[in-house]
Image (cartoon, rainbow, N blue to C red):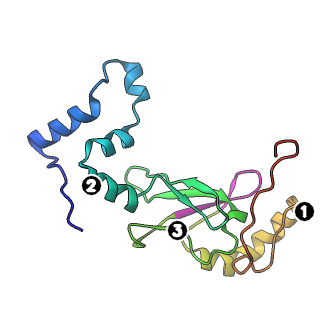
């Protein structure tokens, strides 16, 4: 869709930066600056709405978990969440109207990545069976279904005394 964007060259860039940096008058203010939010707020409302919709700060997985999307400079966007949060999903979330697949960091219960992939279907078919064996030994109290792509998402139970 055609959306008005500010000209980010010469004078247009200077004006855009002045909007973003308004009120930043100390090192502490610079460290507190939420640069992505400031950039979004400096855009015209239609452009900000489109950008928020196409490149959101968070996505919600099938299990209902809301996860932050990381946008590292010069690299592909990624998310991370527990492996169980991806159960029942044949493919990972995509951005930009389905054109940009997210890089998925699939975490074990200890919050360490057991796999990083964009191909969730390939992971379930080729890699998960071996990882499943290891995880079943290390984490026997967790559910590790054979066909994780076909089962329903697993919602976290509240910790005892925290419900």
In magenta stretch: residue 49: no
Q: SS at mark 2?
A: helix
Mark 1 — residue?
A: 140
Q: CA distance from mark 3 to mark 2?
A: 22 Å
Quickly name the residue at label 2: 47
Circle nearer the viewer, 3 or 2: 2
Residue 131: % across, % down: 76, 69
Measuring from the top left, give residue 54's x and y in whole percent: 38, 62
> In the rendered view of the protein, which quadrant contains the N terminus?
bottom left
Residue bounds of the magenta highlight? 103-114
Q: Nearer the viewer, mark 3 or mark 1?
A: 3
Q: Residue at 86% across / 66% down in the picture?
A: 136
The residue positioned 86% from the left and 59% from the top of the image is 138
**Where on the picture, by quarter, is residue 155?**
bottom right
Q: Earlier in the sequence, mark 2 or mark 1?
A: 2
What residue did someone put label 3 on?
93
């Amino acid at each position: 869709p055609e959306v008005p964007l500010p000209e980010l060259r010469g004078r247009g860039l200077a004006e855009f930066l002045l909007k973003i940096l308004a009120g930043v008058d100390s090192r502490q203010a610079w460290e507190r600056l939420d640069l992505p939010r400031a950039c979004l707020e400096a855009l015209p409302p239609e452009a900000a709405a489109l950008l928020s919709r196409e490149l959101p700060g968070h996505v919600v997985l099938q299990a209902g978990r809301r996860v932050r999307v990381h946008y590292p400079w010069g690299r592909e966007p990624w998310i991370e969440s527990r492996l169980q949060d991806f159960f029942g999903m044949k493919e990972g979330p995509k951005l930009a109207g389905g054109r940009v697949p997210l890089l998925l960091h699939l975490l074990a219960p200890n919050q360490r990545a057991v796999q990083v992939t964009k191909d969730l279907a390939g992971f379930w078919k080729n890699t998960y069976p071996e990882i499943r064996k290891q995880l079943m030994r290390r984490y026997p109290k967790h559910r590790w279904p054979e066909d994780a792509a076909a089962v329903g998402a697993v919602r976290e139970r509240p910790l005892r005394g925290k419900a």
